[in-house]
Amino acid sequence: MKRPLLISTLLLLLAQASVAASLRNYENRVTRAAEQIERIKTDSEYSEQGLETIRELLPRSEKIEHEGKTASVDNTWLYVSLDSYISEKDPQGKLAKLNEIGGRLRALDEQLVRAEETSAGKTDSTNARSEINKILERPEYREKQDSRIGAFIKEVWRKIGDFLSELYAAFMRLLGKIFGSTAQNSWFANILIIAVLAAAVIFIMRVVRQIKPRKKRGRKRTILGEELDAATTPRDLADAAMAAARAGDFRTAIRKLYISLLYDLAERNVIELEDSATNHEYLARLSRFNSLTAPVGYLTDRFDYCWYGMTPSSEEEFSTCLARYKEAMERAQSLGPQAAS
């Protein structure tokens, strides 16, 4: 049933391995991948097919050609994110991961379009290639090597898997010696295996019940994928933003500032926080408050560009965001009872 799909996939990979794709072709495929994410969000039954399509559109690594030069692109970040989405069991968590993937794909697409437009308007092809290579050669689009800790964990899991496989094989050999070689495939062997597994599960459950759970300090909040303790306040986030700015990490500072604003607006009943809501969904919910549209809209765009776009920020940009943040906070204070209605 899947043979035509397999053949088409192999042909696509062979073509991409032999001929480097153009920048426009790569940008078009990024756009289509982002569209697949949106379709998966609205149709859960399409998830498996959509993920397969995304992998076909954006291989783990490929060559991009532009103006006679070739650049290597590594989409490992996308595959790691897709695997994380698949392993996530909580529906809200899965939706949040889709929002994160979709946001990064849209931001990458916007940067590629901007690079194409910049290239088309420049007479100096060297400068044009430089702008494009700055995007394609960023760390998030290059292959990441496992850290020593990551490699150690993978090796431990591999050894555990090998141990369990050997244990199972030894158990089956023992059954063969006791009940004969045919017993390994008999119904008695299957029942015995199930009984052993059931006993192991019961033992583990008893051990887990004896473990005293840690006392919860209160309901945690999740804003744009960032989990906050119940004791955290908008002021704490604003202070964290200023601390990040003083340390020179303006990209994180803008993120903390934006989340602080959303948190404060939720405390004033202007918006309602949802674990899976995106930044643009929050902005849409503020459309009835005309005084907030401009400053919050500006911060939303800057957050999109700096965080999802993986673009470094500057002190000047953070200062502008801080001014718009203060403006939004002042206007939110002036809403009064209107906010709760």
Image: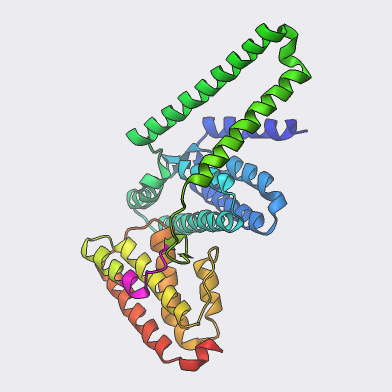
Q: Quadrant of residue 328?
A: bottom left
Q: Front-most of 256 and 201?
A: 201
Q: Where residue 275 sits: x, y (%)? A: 53, 64
Vertical order, 194 against 293 (above or below)? above
Of all residues shown, which one is farthest toward the left? 246
Is 229 magenta? The answer is yes
Side of 86 where 142 appears, left or right: left
Vertical order, 123 against 143 (above or below)? below
Q: Front-most of 27 and 308?
A: 308
- Residue at 41% in and 38% down: 143
Side of 74 where 244 appears, left or right: left
Side of 4 where 242 appears, left or right: left
- Residue at 50% in and 38% down: 60
Vertical order, 186 against 322 (above or below)? above
Vertical order, 138 against 2 (above or below)? below
Q: Where residue 314 sits: x, y (%)? A: 27, 64
Is 117 magenta? The answer is no
Q: Front-most of 177 and 76?
A: 177
Q: Where residue 31 sits: x, y (%)? A: 57, 54
Quadrant that contains the N terminus = top right
- Residue at 47% in and 77% down: 266
Q: Front-most of 205 and 182?
A: 205
- Residue 298 visible in the displayed image: no
Quadrant that contains the C terminus = bottom right
Q: Quadrant of residue 69?
A: top left
- Residue 231 visible in the displayed image: yes
Q: Where residue 294 sits: x, y (%)? A: 44, 81
- Residue at 33% in and 74% down: 321
* Magenta stretch, residue numbers: 228-238
